[in-house]
Image (tube, grey):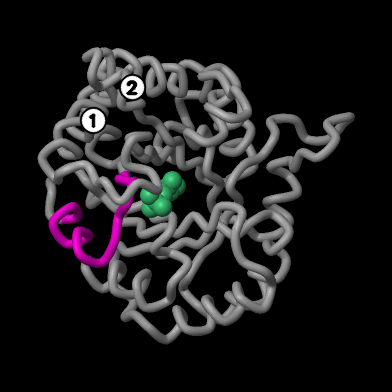
Amino acid sequence: MARKTIIAGNWKMNLLPEEGEMLVVSLKTAFENKKNLEVVVFPPIGLIPFAREWIYDSVIRYGAQNCWHEVSGPYTGETSPELLKSLGCSYCLVGHSERREIFEESNELVGRKSQALVEMGIIPIVCVGESLAEREAAIHFEKIQQQVESVFEAVEKESWIHLVFAYEPIWAIGTGKTATPKQAEEIHQFIRKIIRQKSGDVLADAISILYGGSAKPGNAEELLAQDNIDGLLVGGASLVAEDFSNIIKAY
Ligand code: 13P
């Protein structure tokens, strides 16, 4: 099965409604739809109902940057996968390093969120990655292995096919310092090996693994040319229509 290539824009906590609309309107006409290509934007939660209006006549999909793992209840400020589903989200990011670090999200919590999402038919994009200190201490493989394995422990087997991973080295996020294609490919191969051990060849060859961390028009083509890099999760450059559409065109 050919893997899907996903070019995703994580807007993080940026853009007001009129800015988001301008960005999406420009994107809608800025690239050619291709087989196996999925373009996804992740606006802040308050813009999701607007995104639905901006995007309904386009191949672009949208998703949320985070969710809680319960359907409803006393979780002030949180958003359920059920609500995301009713708002038309196809994807949701989980375990972004900003959430793991600032909001102290554990592997276990990331796993529970992933399971809650697949139950709702929403594809979780599970972010994994190491800090500079962990890379320098040569414990990055171990950390990533734990992050990936805990998802397989939490998500029911029948839904493994719906998982997507994103390797985002923390030292490359928002720093302008991209992992070299060789560094990224090494980790992507490693993640695919873990998936292969957990779930066998069919799933290992079908699950998309994206790269994120200072992806931009100038490095997108080389990153996407790597055998195990199946797309990009773009932060800063996804806020600029020209840059994001040039990244999409690099595929
Ligand atoms: P930058 O592309 O700004 O480095 O952000 C990457 C990221 O965190 C995407 O989720």
The residue beneath circle 1 is 192
Q: Residue at x 66, y 39 (%)?
A: 67
Quadrant location, the C terminus: bottom left
Residue 91 x/y as whole percent: 53, 50
Instruction: Determine whether the residue tagged by mark 2 lies in a helix, strand or loop.
Output: helix
Residue furthest out toward the right: 74
Up-down: is 40 above or below 120? below
Q: Is residue 48 left or right of residue 75?
A: left
Crowding around mark 2 (Cα neighbors within 10 Å: few <14, some 14 to 19, many 20+) is many
Kindly identify the amino acid type of the residue bearing the numbered disc 1: Arg
Q: Which residues are magenta?
A: 210-224
Give the mark count: 2
Q: Which mark is residue 151?
A: none
The residue under the point 51% across, 41% down is 124
The first of marks 2 and 1 along the sequence is 2
Residue 144 - label = 2
Q: Between marks 2 and 1, how big is the CA–CA gap? A: 11 Å
Q: Is residue 67 above or below residue 3?
A: above
Instruction: Determine whether 173 is above or below 192 in the image.
Output: below
Question: Is 211 within the magenta?
Answer: yes
Give the SS element for disc 1. helix
Q: Amino acid at mark 2?
A: Ile
